[in-house]
Image (cartoon, grey):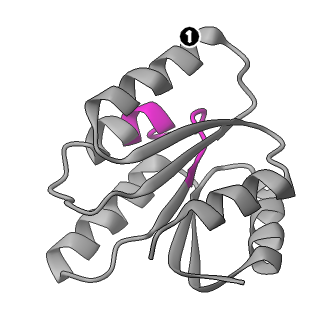
């Protein structure tokens, strides 16, 4: 099984969070899976990690439709942070709108981080592929 230091799941849907965690626990070993109900909570934690010089998550599952700070606002803030290491960001959304896919592609062109667009529900095979692609 793939060893991953930490994973952030940024999604306000408890069913999606549960499903991702259940699959992750069967395809990888992880020191910590952290849940955030909105982008603001996640970006605040990431900023704290940067200040403390702790380990950043290697993998982020990100919903785009959330209260307080949505996934797009999160990405706006995230790509401005002084993070040298490439983080794997997987947008997981129920949106099938081409505008959202184009927006994800635009973010991909603005950053060195890996950004992948996935549709809900995310499947085990997709999570296996995502975790296998992480270079530790």
Q: What x and y, as percent, mark residue 60?
A: 52, 58
Residue located at (21% from left, 59% from top): 83
Q: What x and y, as percent, mark residue 130?
A: 64, 57
Q: Assign the C terminus to one quadrant of the image.
A: bottom left
Residue located at (35% from left, 56% from top): 43
Q: What x and y, as percent, mark residue 52?
A: 19, 82
Q: Is residue 28 visible?
A: yes
Q: Quadrant of residue 54?
A: bottom left
**What count of labels does the image hold?**
1
Q: Quadrant of residue 22?
A: bottom right
Does 67 sit above or below residue 1? above
Q: SS of the residue at dot 1? A: helix
What residue does disc 1 label? Answer: 99
Q: Write the start and end of the magenta stretch as one range.
A: 61-74
Residue 79 within the segment the image draws in magenta: no
Residue 67 within the segment the image draws in magenta: yes
């Amino acid at each position: 099984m793939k060893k991953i230091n930490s994973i952030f799941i940024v999604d306000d849907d408890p069913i999606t969070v549960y499903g991702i965690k259940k699959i992750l626990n069967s395809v990888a070993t992880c020191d910590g899976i952290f849940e955030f109900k909105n982008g603001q909570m996640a970006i605040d934690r990431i900023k704290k990690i940067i200040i403390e010089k702790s380990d950043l998550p290697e993998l982020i599952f990100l919903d785009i439709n959330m209260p307080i700070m949505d996934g797009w606002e999160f990405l706006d803030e995230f790509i401005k942070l002084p993070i040298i290491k490439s983080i794997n960001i997987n947008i997981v959304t129920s949106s099938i709108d081409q505008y959202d896919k184009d927006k994800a592609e635009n973010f991909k062109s603005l950053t060195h981080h890996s950004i992948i667009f996935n549709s809900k529900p995310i499947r085990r095979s997709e999570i296996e592929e995502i975790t296998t692609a992480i270079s530790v």
